[in-house]
Image (cartoon, rainbow, N blue to C red):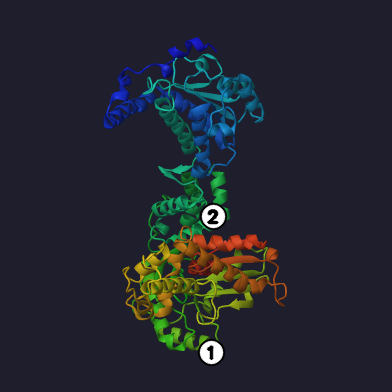
């Protein structure tokens, strides 16, 4: 390496346009930098044939599991690491398939390791440690100057053993280009930097654009997209979960108007894979069959759909075919949810109405009204007409699960009312407690018979189920579910009650002058806003809670505060304390009694599944608190499955039984 020639490199040249940049106003300075940045994209145009060639070389290797290794020093190394690290979550590539190496090791990502880039042998040693497979692995050497010794060493080693090699530089000619070790040399020339030698600027931008094109183009070619939509991503965080939902709605007619809960349930069945979920949604076939189609078509969605004889994803339901519909209703203390599904278990329509807890016999008539409203809404959304016919006659099977249905004498009274008002399905009608819906999850885990269902909605309850081959899950034990007046620890009402009591205390202290400066925290302010009360010394929260204009009864109004608490349980100290104590109560008392070794019906957690559901427990913050407490207590279940939509689970269980029969 001849340091005397350093000043002759394009990346080190002085930019005549920016020689007086230090004397410009801030706006003029930004305008000048922006003008220079506009030169970058055009510098890639002459390189497109080389980029395309590199993509075509990478595609078959990546498809067959080959690795792509990015190597560089300084900014170049960090850009390689960035591209390599973003491919797995974006395109569901295996974590070890795209690897970024930087001279000086991981410590150099955040702090420069002086001298590391000047060693050819260090590059060769790093390559040797990867045990490269020349038949499948490829190496991308990134060096803005085109002369970094570390990169030269990496590329030389890779070429020597037969790997595909790609060079990305911003200089011409370059040592890397003249080495004879590069199969594809990509050399955009964006010109001198705004600040001489600062290659993190235009050279860095050009490099990022090249790497974007290389990795994205390769992913498109191996079938990670459908059209211009990413379909081979894994819903591993909140942003990707929402993106996954949007993709499924956009690409599948069957799920175009589906709720988040329906789509999350589908994704859960497909292990978070959007591509697999789309084929399952469009074909109605099992997850295993659709996975086989994908593998046979080398993971290309369009070909897998052709193989399944689905002409175009996103097409309308076929017209005129006879639908074999199933209905499932989940009625609880807060709402009644109805789901209409076809014989494959795909949700066609959903409906929702008010509470359907029939524990109080005085609520039977209103429960019938809410049940009817929810089912009619679901049928309407599914575009199913029942004109001049009893509502339930539209279905082959129905499962109506309502809170309180297992109370002595209630089932018989309510079932007769249902059939009188709604009719009867052409096949079977099942009536049960709402918790029993979640026992359907056991069928997904045939090797684990017992399971505990833990619910924290408005109230809380835990039930243990077991099953024998070919039989319905049978409830064997129950804990909690006493109602909000006597228990329901860890449920939404209990969480909301603690927040309301705390806020009432603060309001009273303000009115008494104990808090003269009206010191209100995030939680108190949010509770007052929820009840429509402005901050003043005369805050009358009690009247609004007990008889206010917010709608619903006192129980409903208080339970609605739970989500305020849980939303703030990452930033507000009081909300964190309430949520944590309620999660502990849910685990220690409601769930704890079923796994207490002193119990005559205790179950060993490691041989038992745990099913989580309920509005409060589906809140990510609260669910994480519960799972953290279990982990802290060293309680490990055979599996843990969160079910955001019990009605959809029940409908799919009905559909599955129909196919088996």
Residue 59 visible in the displayed image: no
**Of the image marks 2 and 1, the number of the one nearer the N terminus:** 2
Q: Is residue 118 left or right of residue 388?
A: right
Front of the two marks 2 and 1: 1
The C terminus sits in image quarter: bottom right
Where 399 falls versus 229 (above or below)? below
Secondary structure of the residue carrying tag 2 is loop
Give the percent coordinates (x, y) of residue 459: 51, 75
Q: Is residue 412 left or right of residue 21?
A: right
Give the percent coordinates (x, y) of residue 181: 56, 18
Where 611 falls versus 104 (above or below)? below
Where 228 falls versus 487 (above or below)? above
The N terminus sits in image quarter: top right
User: How packed is label 2: few (under 14 Cα within 10 Å), some, or many (20 or more)?
Assistant: many
The image quadrant that residue 476 belongs to is bottom right
Q: CA distance from mark 2 to mark 1?
A: 41 Å
Q: Which residue is mark 1?
A: 409
Secondary structure of the residue carrying tag 1 is loop
Q: Which residue is mark 2?
A: 270
Q: Is residue 133 left or right of residue 228?
A: right
Give the percent coordinates (x, y) of residue 642: 55, 63
Give the percent coordinates (x, y) of residue 210: 44, 29
């Amino acid at each position: 390496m001849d340091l005397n020639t350093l000043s002759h490199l394009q990346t080190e040249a002085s930019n005549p346009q920016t020689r007086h940049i230090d004397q410009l106003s801030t706006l003029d300075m930004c305008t000048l930098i922006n003008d220079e940045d506009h030169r970058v994209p055009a510098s890639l145009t002459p390189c497109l044939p080389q980029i395309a060639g590199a993509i075509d070389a990478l595609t078959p290797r990546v498809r067959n599991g080959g690795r792509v290794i990015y190597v560089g020093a300084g900014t170049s190394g960090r850009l390689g690491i960035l591209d390599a690290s973003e491919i797995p979550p974006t395109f569901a590539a295996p974590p070890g398939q795209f690897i970024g190496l930087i001279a000086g090791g991981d410590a150099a990502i955040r702090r420069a390791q002086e001298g590391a880039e000047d060693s050819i042998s260090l590059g060769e040693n790093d390559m040797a440690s990867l045990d490269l497979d020349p038949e499948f692995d490829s190496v991308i050497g990134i060096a803005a100057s085109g002369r970094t010794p570390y990169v030269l060493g990496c590329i030389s080693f890779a070429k020597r053993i037969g790997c595909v090699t790609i060079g990305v530089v911003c200089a011409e000619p370059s040592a890397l280009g003249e080495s004879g070790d590069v199969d594809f040399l990509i050399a955009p020339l964006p010109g001198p930097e705004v600040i001489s030698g600062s290659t993190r600027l235009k050279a860095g931008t050009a490099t990022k654009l090249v790497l974007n094109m290389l990795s994205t183009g390769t992913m498109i070619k191996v079938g990670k997209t459908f059209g211009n939509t990413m379909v081979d991503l894994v819903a591993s965080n909140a942003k990707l979960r929402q993106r996954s939902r949007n993709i499924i709605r956009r690409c599948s007619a069957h799920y175009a108007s589906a709720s988040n809960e329906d789509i999350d349930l589908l994704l859960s069945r497909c292990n978070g894979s959007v591509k697999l979920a789309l084929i399952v949604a469009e074909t109605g076939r099992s997850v295993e069959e659709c996975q086989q189609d994908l593998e046979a078509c080398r993971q290309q969605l369009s070909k897998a759909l052709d193989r399944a004889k689905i002409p175009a994803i996103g097409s309308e339901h076929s017209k005129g075919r006879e639908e074999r519909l199933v209905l499932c209703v989940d009625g609880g203390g807060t709402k009644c949810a109805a789901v209409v599904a076809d014989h494959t278990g795909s949700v066609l329509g959903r409906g929702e109405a008010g509470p359907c807890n029939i524990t109080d016999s005085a609520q039977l008539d209103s429960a019938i009204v809410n049940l009817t409203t929810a089912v009619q809404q679901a049928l309407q959304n599914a575009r199913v007409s029942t004109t001049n016919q009893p509502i339930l006659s539209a279905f082959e099977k129905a499962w109506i699960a309502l809170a309180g249905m297992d109370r002595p004498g209630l089932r018989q009274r309510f079932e007769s009312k249902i059939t009188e008002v709604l009719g009867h399905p052409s096949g079977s009608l099942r009536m049960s407690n709402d918790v029993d819906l979640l026992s359907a999850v056991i069928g997904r885990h045939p090797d684990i018979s017992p399971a505990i269902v833990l619910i924290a909605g408005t109230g809380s309850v835990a039930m243990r189920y077991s099953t024998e081959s070919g039989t319905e899950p049978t409830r064997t034990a129950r804990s909690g579910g006493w109602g909000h007046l006597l228990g329901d620890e860890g449920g939404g009402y209990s969480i909301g009650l603690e927040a309301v009591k705390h806020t009432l205390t603060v309001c009273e202290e303000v009115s008494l002058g104990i808090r003269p400066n009206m010191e209100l925290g995030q939680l108190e302010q949010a509770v007052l806003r929820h009840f429509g009360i402005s901050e003043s010394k005369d805050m009358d929260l009690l009247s609004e809670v007990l008889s206010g204009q917010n709608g619903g009864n006192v129980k409903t109004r208080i339970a609605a505060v739970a989500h305020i608490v849980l939303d703030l349980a990452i930033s507000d100290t009081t909300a964190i304390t309430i949520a944590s104590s309620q999660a502990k109560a849910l685990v220690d008392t409601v769930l704890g009694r079923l796994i207490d070794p002193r119990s005559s019906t205790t179950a060993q957690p490691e041989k038992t599944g745990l099913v989580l559901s309920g509005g409060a427990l589906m809140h990510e913050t609260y669910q994480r608190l519960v799972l953290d407490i279990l982990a802290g207590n060293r309680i490990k279940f055979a599996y843990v499955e969160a079910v955001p939509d019990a009605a959809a689970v029940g409908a799919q269980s009905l559909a599955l039984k129909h196919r088996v029969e």
